[in-house]
Image: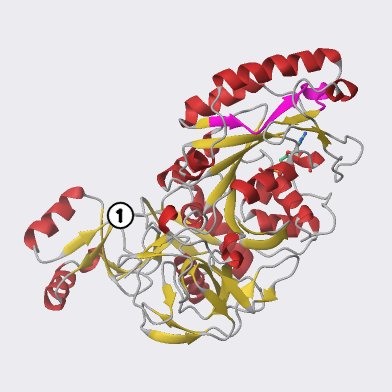
Amino acid sequence: MSQNRAALPPEIARRRTFAIISHPDAGKTTLTEKFLLFGGAIQMAGQVRAKGEARRTRSDFMKMEQDRGISVSASAMSFDYREFRFNLVDTPGHSDFSEDTYRTLTAVDAAIMVIDGAKGVESQTRKLFEVCRLRDLPILTFCNKMDRESRDTFEIIDEIQENLAIDVCPASWPIGIGRDFLGCYDILHDRLELMDRADRNRVAESIKISGLDDPKLADHVPAELLAKLREELEMARELLPAFDRESLLNGSLTPIWFGSAINSFGVKELMDGMGEWGPEPQPQKALERQILPEETAVTGFVFKVQANMDPKHRDRVAFVRLASGHFERGMKLLHVRTKKPMAVSNPVLFLAADRELAEEGWAGDIIGIPNHGQLRIGDALTEGEALHFTGIPSFAPELLQTVRAGDPMKAKHLEKALMQFAEEGAAKVFKPMIGSGFIVGVVGALQFEVLASRIEQEYSLPVRFEGSQFTSARWVSGPKAELERFVNINKGHIAEDHDGDVVFMTRLQWDIDRVQRDFPELKLTATKEMMV
Ligand code: G4P
């Protein structure tokens, strides 16, 4: 389809919107930090850091903010690198299944997969990779920590190819291993890149080489390592696929760079790769039609809602991926779900080190729109067209627990906190018709812990999660009279979600089958479609 389209306007064509995925500890935060450093968004990479799980519960950007005292905004960061505008979208860092992560990946056009050179493909890498694969996202791979003992290069590449079923093409090739790691041969540009071990934030000049026979190589690489490099590269040329941008863009091939984020090594080559070969803003799907980035009318969709970005205010920021057009501050957009116009007067662009009021944005950008709860995940904003974006997944809550405030007098506060998380899409919250308390539904057990700690931190409210008498929740819809009749007969099983919609709760599949039989006009669904 891209062949038939005219070239994108330059402002759109220079944008790269992507996320970084990795298993915890592979080096995502360090790499992000170096991106920001080379993108001029921060002045110096930080030194101070918290340890372990504590820094993994919230987003990486917040973690950096807390750990290092640098001011970066949560969720999305924009910065310029060479002629490119990078929009780096943060993926939340819980080690459990997280809905947030999945949704975030709907807002990007590409991903960088970071793996640890000693560990290879780990469990979380695989899970996140699968999500990228569902959307055929182009993936660039960074094999990190090459300054330490790592696996054999062919072994790493084989593991990715076999484990993830994707072709791997080396963009660079490591010279030496561990202590003897010298740097890389840049295969795509015929350059020698040497690592500066003395200064972690410095990048040594690249050395242009005319090919593997260039005698200049011997001035920089000891004979033994050079012989090995030549031999390995020859084998690689025979055994591994060559770089092909089309295959990168359709998600069937990933180029791999070897480097060391902490030593700033290999990072610029990766950024160059993202700029030169990464995808331009891609068309987005809506129920009605496909939306092309170059269309002049502005459209966008909310993929994330975040509350408490400023602890003094209880307002929310909706993160909108612009799908088309040229957005300008003050524009009036149609909020398609409520059919109401919305003046976007104080949008935030997460530019460089500070949050800034966005004066403009282009397709591919992420803007933050402060609001009081009107904007929900999946909502569309347009210049008038009734569009419903698809592809933002909705998840069936698989684990249900009852939640109570440690102090029963604080039930109202608890309700407020829970509603906030329901709006953010962090959990499903059900208020039973009979009895007190709330039932919370999630997809991964760790989410209960994350919620408990957030409620305690953000609302100073200790809470307890307990087993619930129910194990399944089904949204019920249908003709009003029939719905009322059903609710009246089943009061003990009925709850409302945060939008006031009716939910049927039970332990037994048999109950669900019975309802479908007795109330054929009603529809029971395991997920609530957020779009319409
Ligand atoms: P994550 O966000 O993926 O969880 O990883 P993060 O960047 O926090 O890095 C995890 C650990 O790996 C950190 O060590 C970090 O310093 C280290 N690291 C990152 N890149 C490299 C690299 O290229 N080489 C080496 N040798 N280590 C690297 P830590 O002990 O948890 O923290 P710190 O005390 O070293 O700061």
> How far across and how far down the image is residue 368, in percent?
58, 72
Residue at image coords 53%, 63%? 8
Q: Is residue 58 left or right of residue 493?
A: right
Q: Is residue 298 left or right of residue 196?
A: left
- In which quadrant is the N terminus drawn? bottom left
Residue at image coords 39%, 56%? 393
The answer to which quarter of the image holds residue 429 is bottom left
Mark 1 Cα-neighbour bin, 10 Å: few <14, some 14–19, many ≥20: some
> How far across and how far down the image is residue 151, in percent?
67, 21
Q: Which residue is mark 1?
A: 470
Residue at image coords 31%, 65%? 287
Ligand 1 falls in quadrant: top right
Image height of 1 relative to 332, above or below: above
- Is 180 magenta? The answer is yes
Amino acid type of the residue tagged 1 in the rendering: Phe
- Is 6 magenta? The answer is no
Instruction: Name the foreground residue: 162 vs 256.
Output: 256
Q: Which residues are magenta?
A: 168-182
> How far across and how far down the image is residue 34, in percent?
76, 49
Q: Is residue 16 left or right of residue 166?
A: right
